[in-house]
Image (cartoon, grey):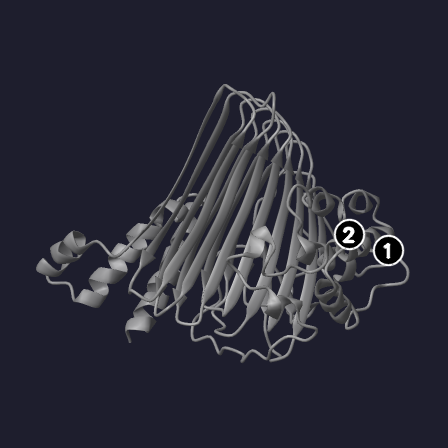
Amino acid sequence: MALPQPKIDATEARLATLSMPETGWSVPARKAALARLRAMGLPGARDEYWKFTRPHSLNAPEPAPAAVFDADEGPFFGNVDRLKIVFVDGVFDPEASDALELEGVEFARLSDGADIHWAQDLYGKLEEAGQSPVERPLAALNTAFASDGLLMRVTGKVEKPISLVYYHRSETSDATLHHVVKVEEGADVTILENGPAAARFNKVMEVDVADRGGFHHVRAQGRDHERQAATHIFARLGTESTFKTFTLTANGVMTRNECVVELTGDDAVAHVAGACMGDGDFHHDDTVFITHDAVNCESRQVFKKVLRNGATGVFQGKILVKPGAQQTDGYQISQSLLLDGDSQFLAKPELEIYADDVACSHGSTSGAIDEEGLFYLRARGLPRGAAEDLLTIAFIAEAVQEIEDERLQDEIVARVEGWLARRRG
């Protein structure tokens, strides 16, 4: 079917501001992604998976200016022994980063011209596979035009996390990053991400986890009030492998996080979780698609959103169980805590099942703060604000507990406590 002319015009206007490398190992994948993008066009408000989130600001040829937020807190994950890798407005900063050396990991940059055979086999491939049955044009745009990113081949059990730190310094920065992570058989790695990154941020991470491999991911999307972001994670899991990701989001005028996971090996496990704290002009969209294509696999989707002063939260989550994917265990929960009558939570949970020996469930709820719990805490001397904060932290606890490392759980909770305290102040 031919694209409507307005969608063609919007796509070409966006492409006119971008440039693609003319040489290098990634060029064939980039050209294929550009062809995909032109065939589907940029997302529009009438597209099924964009009906809750207006994509116009992500489609615009130039980003809207976003004021740089001066953080009044210590560095995220600052107490964790980690390998720190810094990007400033989407550009790698070697002076602020640790040396790209860590036992069990091979590093390269996407912008390097040298051939990297294992990355050539992966770059853009999982993104391409993730375009069906749902088109994800902003991910195709990323593959075509990403200017920087890390290529990481994990060959062993990595002892300390790899921490990707994204700084926002320019009010008009427009960053496009693409990371590729290949976890070899039996290897294991933890990736941390934090920071607002840019005025407008488009990021893709492709993750290939081989048999009995493990990938753990904890992300904190920074506190810039005016930033806009579209992120994608595409993951493919082998036999007895593990994939776990958690995202905490605070502030930002518009954020859309997509996660597409395919369980292709028996006994694989995928957990996708997130929590957000939204206030005022805040729109946050989590869109997840998990495909079970093997026997005895487990998936969990756990999302909690705390919204006030007219903030909007969106959750679109789907579990697809293919024929033959028997003994599937799929769980999905999305809940919102609405702290006033002006905020809203829009949810679209889905199950599509073509196997008969499965245990799949989903649920979605919205509600106000627990008045009984609030009364109980205030009766014991807590001010109302402090009592509300305790109940808020308890509300998001199920999502935070999806993080395996208790040190990282504590870091997330401590940061939420600080944000809530400053809000009261």
Residue name at image x 67 percent, y 33 percent: 210
Which one is earlier in the sequence, the residue at label 1 or at label 2? 1
Residue name at image x 64 percent, y 62 percent: 202
Out of 109 and 120, give the one closest to the viewer.
120
Query: Is residue 85 found left or right of 343 in the rendered image?
Result: right
The reply to whether residue 189 is visible in this rendering is no
Out of 266 and 310, give the one closest to the viewer.
310
The image position of residue 305, as x and y in percent, is 39, 56
The image position of residue 389, as x and y in percent, is 27, 61
The reply to whether residue 358 is visible in this rendering is yes
Out of 196 and 108, give the one closest to the viewer.
196
Question: SS at mark 2?
Answer: helix
Mark 2 lies on residue: 36
- Which amino acid lies under the numbered mark 2 shown in the image of this protein? Arg
Q: Are marks 1 and 2 in contact (CB under 8 Å)?
A: no
Query: Is residue 249 found left or right of 233 in the rendered image?
Result: left
The image position of residue 224, as x and y in percent, is 50, 72
Q: Is 375 placed above or below 131 here?
A: below
Farthest residue to the right: give it. 23
The image position of residue 5, as x and y in percent, is 74, 64
Question: SS at mark 1?
Answer: helix
Residue name at image x 33 percent, y 62 percent: 417
Mark 1 lies on residue: 27
Residue name at image x 76 percent, y 48 percent: 123
